[in-house]
Image: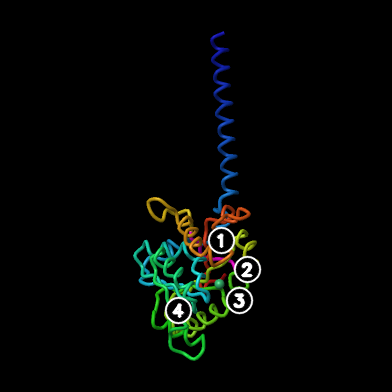
Amino acid sequence: MVTARLMWKAALIASLVVVGAVAALWIGVWRSSSTPSETLSGMTPMTAELSDVGKILWIGPHADDEVYVAGLLYYSHTRGWECVIAAYNASEARRDVNRRSAEFLGCRYVYASEYPGESPAEKIRSLLLAESPDVVVTFHPETGFRGNEAHKAVGRIVTELVEGRELDARLFYVLNRDPALEDLLGGADSASPTHYLNLELQASVDRSLFEVKLADICLYSELVPAAKAICKDVNGVATRMLGLEFYLKYGSNG
Ligand SMILES: [Zn+2]
C-alpha cells in the first residue's frame, strides 16, 4: 500500500515535471518567434561595431529626418561622442523645433545651405569636409528609406565623397525595415541590413532608447503629420513599431 502510494506520488511529480518542461519549451518557442532574435541573426549590434567614435554625423535633406536615427544619436551622446545633425535648410519655425530636438538628443544642428558652394552637392561637401566626422550616417542612395528622391540624392552625394576618399569616415545607411513605418510612410528600403541597434536598451535611469526616440518624434507633432500619428499611436503605429533601428555598412555585402 505504502509502495503503491509512493509510486503514485512519484508518477504525479514526474508528470508535473513533464508538463512544466513542455510549458517552458512552448514559451521559449513562442518568445523566439515573437522577439527579433531570429531576424537579427547575421547582423552586428551597432553597440559592438562602434566603440571608438570621436564624432558621429547624421545627414538628411529634411530638418526632421534625424528622428529616423534618434536612437543611435542619443546612444552616441550617452557614450560621450560628439554628435552632429545636418539637414539642408529649414524655416524659422522648424529651426526652433530642431534646436529642441538637438538639445534633447545631445547633438548640434547644422544646415548645409549655410556652407560655401554653388550647388546643393557642393554645400553638402563643404559641410562634411568642415565637420570631418569619424562616422557618417545617411539615407540609402537607391531606396531613400521610403523612396524619397531628396533622401536618395543626399545618400548619393555622401556616398560619392566616401567612395572618392574625399571624406575619410565610416559610412552607414539607415534602412527602413519596419512594417509599421512602411505602412505609415508608404515605402521602405529593400537592402538587407548588416547592423541593428536594440532600442530596448536603457538610455538613462528612467527610459529606454525607444522612449527617447518616441519623445523626439513627438517634438515634431505640430509640424509633421506622420510624427503626430506616431506620437498619438494612431492605428497602433507606435505600438507596432519594432524596437530596432537597422543600418547597412557601406562596403559590406548587403
Ligand atoms: Zn525626409
Residue bounds of the magenta highlight: 189-197
Magenta stretch: dominant SS? loop
Give me the residue at 40% from left, 50% from top. 206
The image quarter containing residue 143 is bottom right
* Quadrant, the C terminus: bottom right
- Tell which quarter ligand 1 is in: bottom right
Assign a secondary structure to mark 3: loop
Q: Nearer the viewer, residue 194 or 64?
A: 64
Asked if the magenta segment contains residue 196, the reply would be yes
* Quadrant, the N terminus: top right
Question: Amino acid type of disc 4?
Answer: Tyr
Q: Position of residue 60 (x, y in %)?
A: 51, 74
Given this view, does label 3 or label 4 mark the residue nearer the observer?
Answer: 4
Q: CA distance from mark 2 to mark 1?
A: 26 Å
Tell me which label, 3 or 2, sits earlier in the chain.
Answer: 3
Question: Amino acid type of disc 2?
Answer: Ser
Q: Position of residue 107 (x, y in %)?
A: 39, 69
Give me the residue at 38% from left, 72% from top. 55
Vertical placement of residue 56 versus 205, above or below = below
Question: Amino acid type of disc 1?
Answer: Lys
Tell me which label, 2 or 4, sits earlier in the chain.
Answer: 4
Tell me which label, 2 or 1, sits earlier in the chain.
Answer: 2
Query: What residue is shown with label 2?
Result: 190
Query: What residue is shown with label 1?
Result: 228
Query: What residue is shown with label 3?
Result: 142
- Asked if disc 1 and disc 3 are in contact, CB closer than 8 Å, the reply is no
Vertical placement of residue 204 versus 81, above or below = above
